[in-house]
Image (cartoon, rainbow, N blue to C red):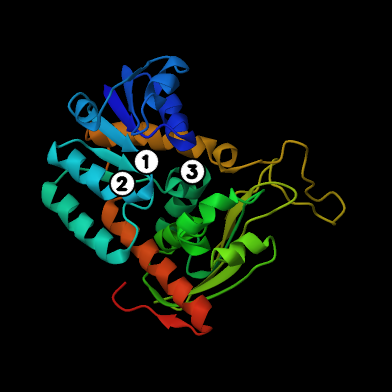
């Protein structure tokens, strides 16, 4: 199997590395819009070869991964499906709801498999949490709590183009938590503050935020996200139900210090960032992508479901600015 990767920045290079390590992948073709960048990346990574343009990439692969900037996703994704190439696209596939809805319509009309790169869905513990909920082992869900904190803020130059904390950082939980609960969100409330650095305020953003989701069946979820955790990168999801209480994301590397005798203490190898925290998820994501291409498994992260998280992110931003809850209609 030959897989293409468009965009060889940090994320694209990580994906190309994981793809090249798979036994069923014979070669990874690399393309980047920046001249010379793909050739440089290929020189550092065995099992890869650089190509000069997107057409050369799409014409010679069994599947393609898009890891270029968000504003390029619609055009590249349409080019891929026009050639019938199964695609894994980093989130989001488009920057606003209207553009995404139109793109999803084109994807579904094409019949080509398109996966969206929400890595939480591919994390083994989160996937097992999903399985147990669907199997009835958790019972009726009472409450979901999700925490997502960066160890260090992103480069401040990135902030104006990031889409804000709800579209950038919390978008993953806005995808994952409704996927876990399996019910529509009917109301959103969000609040945020600038506590880390003035640069976030200058970008009309916040660096710490909380979200409350109310689901159709009455359960609630609380999501908290921040741009700085002095101990390390922290992401965990807790589900409290009528039969069990479970958590994904608590292990020896979780950056959390307990004050209880014998309680958890963060070690020197606490997760420094999301690539380390979700390494197994990213490897599984690439493996499952090849299985979807071969028709061996169903698409675990279809394009249409990614519309839910973007709508919720926009509702969060509206709620943060207005200070009032936002009702979600037809989600």
Circles 1, 3 touching at the beta carbon (< 8 Å): no
Provide the secondary structure element on which disc 3 rests: loop
User: In what element is the residue under mark 2?
Assistant: helix
**CA separation in Å, label 2 and label 3:** 27 Å
Q: In the image shown, does 3 or 23 lie closer to the viewer? A: 3
State the residue at coordinates (51%, 60%).
170
The quadrant of the picture occupied by the C terminus is: bottom left
The residue shown at (30%, 28%) is 4
Bin the neighbour count of mark 1 within 10 Å (Cα to Cα): few under 14, some 14-19, many 20 and up: many
In the image, what residue occupies the spot 43% across and 51% down?
131
Q: Describe the element under mark 1 as helix, strand or loop.
A: loop
Look at mark 3 in the image and give the residue it sits on.
123
Q: Quadrant of residue 89?
A: top left
Q: Report if the CB atoms under discs 2 and 3 are less than 8 Å apart.
A: no
The residue indicated by pointer 2 is 72
Residue 68: assigned label: 1
Q: Which residue appears at 77% of the width and 37% of the height?
A: 268
Q: Depth-wise, is mark 1 or mark 3 nearer the camera?
A: 1
Query: In screen coordinates, is 35 left or right of 106?
Result: right
Q: CA distance from mark 1 to mark 2?
A: 7 Å
Which image quadrant: the N terminus?
top left
In x, y percent, where is residue 114? 25, 45
First along the sequence among labels 2 and 3: 2
The location of residue 152, given as percent across then percent down, is 66, 49
Residue 215, above or below 303: below
Sequence order check: which comes first, mark 1 or mark 3?
1
134 vs 186: above or below: above
Asked if the residue under mark 2 is in contact with the one under mark 1, i.e. CB atoms within 8 Å, the reply is yes
Q: Position of residue 297 (x, y in %)?
A: 28, 39
């Amino acid at each position: 199997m030959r897989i293409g990767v468009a965009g060889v920045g940090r994320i694209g290079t990580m994906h190309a590395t994981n793809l090249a390590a798979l036994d069923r992948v014979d070669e990874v073709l690399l393309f980047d819009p920046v001249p010379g960048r793909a050739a440089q990346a290929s020189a550092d990574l065995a099992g890869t070869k650089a190509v000069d343009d997107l057409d050369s990439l799409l014409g010679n692969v069994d599947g393609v991964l898009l890891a270029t900037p968000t504003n390029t996703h619609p055009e590249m994704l349409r080019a891929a499906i026009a050639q019938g190439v199964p695609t894994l696209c980093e989130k989001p596939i488009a920057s606003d709801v209207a553009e995404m809805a139109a793109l999803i319509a084109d994807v579904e009309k094409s019949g080509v498999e398109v996966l969206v790169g929400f890595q939480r869905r591919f994390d083994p513990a989160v996937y097992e949490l999903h399985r147990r909920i669907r199997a009835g082992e958790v019972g009726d869900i009472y409450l979901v709590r999700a925490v997502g904190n960066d160890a260090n803020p992103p480069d401040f130059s990135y902030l104006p183009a990031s889409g804000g904390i709800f579209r950038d950082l919390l978008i993953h939980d806005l995808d994952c938590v409704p996927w876990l609960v399996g019910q529509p969100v009917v109301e959103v409330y969000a609040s945020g503050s600038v506590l880390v650095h003035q640069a976030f305020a200058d970008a009309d953003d916040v660096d710490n935020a909380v979200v409350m989701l109310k689901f159709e069946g009455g359960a609630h979820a609380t999501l908290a996200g921040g741009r700085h955790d002095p101990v390390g990168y922290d992401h965990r999801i807790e589900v409290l139900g009528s039969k069990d209480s479970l958590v994904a994301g608590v292990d020896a590397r979780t950056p959390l210090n307990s004050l209880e005798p014998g309680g958890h203490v963060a070690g020197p190898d606490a997760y420094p960032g999301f690539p380390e925290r979700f390494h197994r998820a990213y490897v599984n994501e690439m493996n499952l992508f090849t299985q979807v291409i071969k028709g061996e498994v169903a698409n675990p992260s279809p394009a249409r479901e990614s519309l839910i998280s973007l709508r919720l992110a926009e509702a969060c931003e509206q709620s943060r600015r207005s200070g009032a809850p936002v009702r979600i209609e037809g989600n």
